[in-house]
Amino acid sequence: MATNTPVRWKLGLVAAVAIMLLALYPQLDLWLARGADWQGSYARIDSDEVAYSAYLAALIDGRPRLSDPYTGRDDEHASPQHESLFSIQFIQPLAIARVARIFDLSATTLFILLAPLVALASALSIFRLMALMTGDERLSAAAVLVVLCLGTFGPVYVAWQSLRAMDTTYAFSFLPFLRRFQPALAFPFFFLFCAFVWRTLRSSEIRTAALFGATACLIFVLLLFSYFYLWTAALAWLACLALSLLTLRPDGWRRDAGRVGLIFAACLPSFIPYGALLSNRAPSMDATQLLAHTHRPDLFHWSEVLGILVIIALAWGRRRGPFERFDHVSAFAASFALVPLVVFNQQVLTGRSLQPLHYDLFIAKYIALIALILLSVQLRRGRAAGERVLPVPALCVIVISAFGWGCVETVVATKRYAPVNVAMDKTRAVGLRLAEMARAEGLNRPLTLSTDLMLADSLPTDGPLPVLWAPHLQVFSGAGTVEHKQRLYQHLYYTGVAYGPGDELAFDGLDPHKRYFINALIGWGRDDSAWNAGWRPVTASEIEAEMRGYSEFINTFDQERAAHPLLSYVAAPAWQKIDFTNLDRWYERGAGERVGEFIIYRVKLRT
């Protein structure tokens, strides 16, 4: 077990190809659906991907790190910009934007390429880590499929929802780790970090151990400036590993604990520039990212339950089972099992909780599954010499079951997103045409009002062009809380949404699920308790207060407000009946140009 024999990659590559096929399926489905009408769009697997592609498009366009693709504002001496979630986590977008400029690729093309490439890298990094720890290539290849295909805990959720007689549709999610480019591009590096820490502890030569430790430190720095939930999970795991070594005391535990401490110490200086960036974050960022101040524990995630069971099994194995003594595999299994408990409950000490759902989606479940696999390795330590950790028939059943479930989730999730992806591809022609019109007319980042929210969200990627308002506008730092609300008010006003005595039902019918307009006015994340540890539902009084604010806004609307921000284009679906009476009061609107299923209007402020 865990020998220094060179790893044979053949089985790992087979598993990686299987994951790559799943990663490609949504795009293949879009290509088949659109056929010759395909406009070049990527198949979206998460609603937030459009914001990441918008930021990437801005960087490819040559704009600076501190840029806001939705407002069109950049960091300049005369108007410095605050840091956003995207500019702080800059390594991934800057790196792939550089590649895009070298090969003349668009953000959408890169997002198409990222899915299979990340799937390949993630599968191989997990295979390498498991092969190092178990010395069994067959088990390691199986682990790849188990971890990546079952990382949603889909079977558990389906069974749970079925017992509660509830809808199981949304228990089927498509490989969350592939969300581009967060956490996708950084995801494989988490497991490489763990692999290099393993090599650091297992190296007998100090010089070699130092080299591996330095590499682990560099990978941690990459994670630090790549994705919050991965670097915090890596830090938590390192602390859990140190605790496991001190508690389980495998051979050489004093030396190993010291090496882990040195890795941690070497990583500390990187927090200085990170803290500097964080201190310059936009004032609205904490509210936008749903930072909650609470000390309440969170103990009911399935990854925590699995981690606790692994810890109990390890303790039983040492006391009554097959463990004669603990070794590095036991320490790593325990450390992985402890991570979900730490990341979901760190607020007990820190008093701050930041969207713990992202730990659940993007790292905790994968880690818990690795802990379970390592536990299975330890439980079979008493096997005969030369016998594999698990017999081939058992591995075949596990592989077929895991990959089969991955296929089911992929097909169901793709079917759910298919209408959205087809609609997004249809809107891409509008973005390309608007960009062409802006260049021909010599306009620098002209502002567009899109009555279609999907088009509004995607214009900064396809144009790339700024918009008056879009669902993802407030995740960047260009517009503060007040301006964001003013822009949303303008969007509603220009598109004929009235509010006054007797208009309450009409407005509520505009946004019945409180997901876009009302939720954006009151605060994101108020529609689902999973987003925020301090969650509270939207109240009638809050809605009433926002409606009063909107009523006051439209009653005091004037020429100055119409000019800030200044519109250049309006885009609306041809089939959608929009009341442009308010818009036409302040802007001259041209006859319009038909582009696919949309009409583009040139508008000019009335004087």
Image: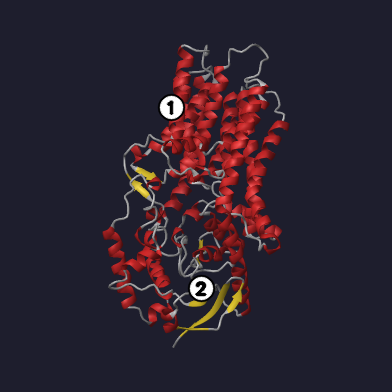
| Residue 535 shows up from this direction | yes
Point out the image quarter for the C terminus. bottom left
Mark 1–mark 2 Cα distance, whole angstroms, equals 53 Å
Give the residue drawn at x 52%, y 21%: 330
Disc 1: CA contacts within 10 A as few (<14), some (14-19) or many (>=20): some
Tell me residue 220's x, y (percent). 54, 40
The tag earlier along the polypeptide, 1 or 2, is 1
Closest to the observer: 185 or 502? 502
> As displayed, is residue 18 above or below residue 1?
below
Q: Secondary structure at mark 1?
A: helix
What's the mark number on residue 100? Answer: none
Q: Which residue lies under the disc numbered 1?
A: 308
Residue placed furthest toward the front: 165
Closest to the observer: 292 or 173? 173
> As displayed, is residue 283 above or below residue 389?
below
Tell me residue 14's x, y (percent). 71, 35
Tell me residue 510's x, y (percent). 40, 65
Closer to the eye: label 1 or 2: 1
Residue type at numbered disc 1: Ile
Closest to the observer: 515 or 375? 515
Question: How many numbered discs, if any?
Answer: 2
Residue type at numbered disc 2: Leu
Q: Secondary structure at mark 2?
A: strand
| Residue 269 shows up from this direction | no
Disc 2: CA contacts within 10 A as few (<14), some (14-19) or many (>=20): many
Give the residue drawn at x 37%, y 63%: 481
Point out the image quarter for the N terminus. top right
Residue placed furthest toward the left: 541
The answer to the question of whether label 1 and label 2 lie on touching residues, with beta carbons closer than 8 A, is no
Q: Which residue lies under the disc numbered 2?
A: 447
Residue placed furthest toward the bottom: 607
